Image (spheres, rainbow, N blue to C red):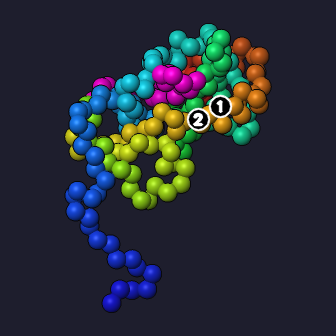
Amino acid sequence: MRPTGCIAMKIAPSERRGARRASRSEPVIAFSISGQMFAIGANAVQEIRTTDSVAAVAVEISVASKPKVRHCLPSGRGATYIVSGWGHFGLSASRPAQVILLRNSRVGVLVDSIDGMETMRILMSLPAGFCGPERSWYRGVTIFGENVVPVVSPSGFLSPREIAELDAGSTSVPDSKALLGGMAEGSLEKAE
């Protein structure tokens, strides 16, 4: 007899665990934020830049409903919004050194480091414990060596609706010293 409130769990056979072996491997870029490793499909990345290299063109913005977005890169096709990686994932504050600009998107992501290219040979479904908004953040998880690594979904950082809200509601902060949260200190975003 099980104690009250306990749920019996049964291990599923391996073919039903949600693991998908790709018919071919996929190159991914491994990166870290606040000591946590993540991966993103290499085909989803347009460019990787240092935070210093975007200092001259980024503009600080303020949208109360989107505190994870504090900067944008103005362009003719609409602003590219820079998402704080640690703010998005709910991690401890960090000092990002690089920006991953996503392909066919108006989104960039602040990351602490690029850890290199990896080959993803298996993509496993998210465990059932991922039941909130984080389900849209990830494609699944993969394994690099003995590490389980979340594979992010490029569309999970900002939805088209959120981008429209940012377009409609952002207010630029004209103070050039405030650009990029204190680039004089060498960071696109100050850790708070």
Report the residue at 77% width, 25% height from top: 171
- Point 70% across, 15% down: residue: 177
Q: Residues within 10 Å of mark 1 (few under 14, many from 20)?
A: some
Reading the image, the residue beneath label 2 is 158
Please tell me whether mark 1 sits on a helix, a strand or a loop: helix
Task: Residue at the far front: name it.
Answer: 23
Residue 124 lies, in percent from the top left, at 32, 48
Q: CA separation, marks 2 and 1? A: 6 Å
The answer to whether residue 94 is left or right of residue 118 is right
What span is colored magenta in the figure? 97-118
Q: Is residue 50 above or below residue 70?
A: above
Left or right of 120, for residue 37:
right
In the displayed structure, 109 sits above or below 14; it is above
Q: Which residue is mark 1?
A: 163
Task: Give me the residue at 43% from left, 86% from top.
Answer: 4
Position of 103 with respect to 192 (left or right) is left
Residue 57 image offset from top left, x and y in percent: 63, 11
Which of disc 1 and disc 2 is earlier in sequence?
Answer: 2
Q: Are marks 2 and 1 in contact (CB under 8 Å)?
A: yes
Task: Kindly tell me whether residue 92 is visible in this rendering.
Answer: no
- Quadrant housing residue 5: bottom left
Q: Nearer the viewer, residue 14 or 169?
A: 14
Magenta: main secondary structure equals strand
Of the 4 image quadrants, the one containing the C terminus is top right
**Three-letter residue code for mark 2:** Leu
**From where the camera sits, is residue 39 visible?**
yes
Residue 95: percent from left, percent from top: 51, 29
Local secondary structure at mark 2: loop
